[in-house]
Amino acid sequence: MTVSNPQSLLRELGRDERLLWSGVPRRGVVFRPSDLMTIPFTLLWGGFAVFWEYSVLSKDAPFFFGIWGVPFVLIGLYMIVGRFFADAYLRGRTEYGVTSQRVIIVSGLLSREVKSLPLAAMADITLSEQSNRTGSIQFGPTPPGRAWMAGTPWPGMAKSQPPTFDLIGNVREVYDLIIKAQQACRDRTTS
């Protein structure tokens, strides 16, 4: 269950800390349940933007109208296709770790970002498991109105989502390990 070369996680460990598990999210382009609602919206947006731009350019409309539609076409292309590749790229640069004291998420689109969550302080841990034993573990509650964006790399939205071990294998085993490590950590602090 441990990744063979978790070097970027090992350099984050404290003096008395042990790495109990490390892993990575599923690689490649992934379609998520939220895409059932998102894809029709993105097709409408992108389709309208392309229709607008085509109409403006084919009818000799003022130059400003031609420029006005370009950002909407680009946003539409990102929403229809680009977001899947941005998500795959970000997951390709992400590693997860569970230590004797905390949960660590190492990721970053343009720079390296390390997120550290102390086990003793965690109150809300949510397991989402698929029939094939893959799934996600979310640390903290989902903000109201943000569930439809879970796992989707909308620019600027990552900071508003709770930290998550996204699309990992043997998710139940990792969840049980976290709960056990959390209890051991709490037992150490109370004794």
Image (spheres, grey):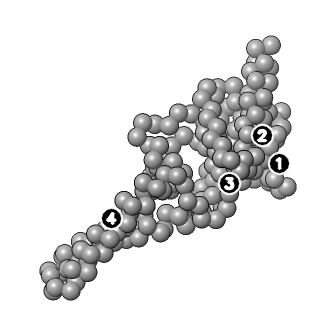
Q: CA distance from mark 2 to mark 1?
A: 9 Å
**Which quadrant of the figure contains the C terminus?**
top right
Disc 3 secondary structure class: loop
Image spot of residue 167 (x, y percent): 65, 51
* Location of residue 138 by image quarter: top right
The foreground one among 39 and 179 is 39
Which amino acid type corresponds to the residue marked 4 in the rendered image?
Trp
The foreground one among 112 and 81 is 81
Residue at mark 3? 25
Image spot of residue 28 (x, y percent): 64, 65
Tell which tag, 4 or 3, sits nearer the viewer. 4
* Depicted 52 relative to depicted 60: above or below: above
Residue at mark 1? 1
Q: CA distance from mark 4 to mark 2?
A: 41 Å
Q: Of callouts 4 and 3, which one flags the residue occurring earlier in the amino acid sequence?
A: 3
Which amino acid type corresponds to the residue marked 1 in the rendered image?
Met
Disc 2 secondary structure class: helix
* Marking on residue 173: 2
Q: Of callouts 3 and 2, which one flags the residue occurring earlier in the amino acid sequence?
A: 3
Q: Please identify the residue farthest to the top as the structure is shown.
A: 191
Q: CA distance from mark 1 to mark 3?
A: 13 Å
Q: CA distance from mark 4 to mark 1?
A: 42 Å
Q: Of callouts 4 and 1, which one flags the residue occurring earlier in the amino acid sequence?
A: 1
Which amino acid type corresponds to the residue marked 3 in the rendered image?
Pro
Q: Is residue 20 left or right of residue 160?
A: right
Q: Of callouts 1 and 3, which one flags the residue occurring earlier in the amino acid sequence?
A: 1
Mark 2 surroundings within 10 Å by alpha-carbon count, few (fewer than 14), some (14 through 19), many (20 or more): few
Q: CA distance from mark 3 to mark 2?
A: 15 Å
Mark 1 surroundings within 10 Å by alpha-carbon count, few (fewer than 14), some (14 through 19), many (20 or more): few
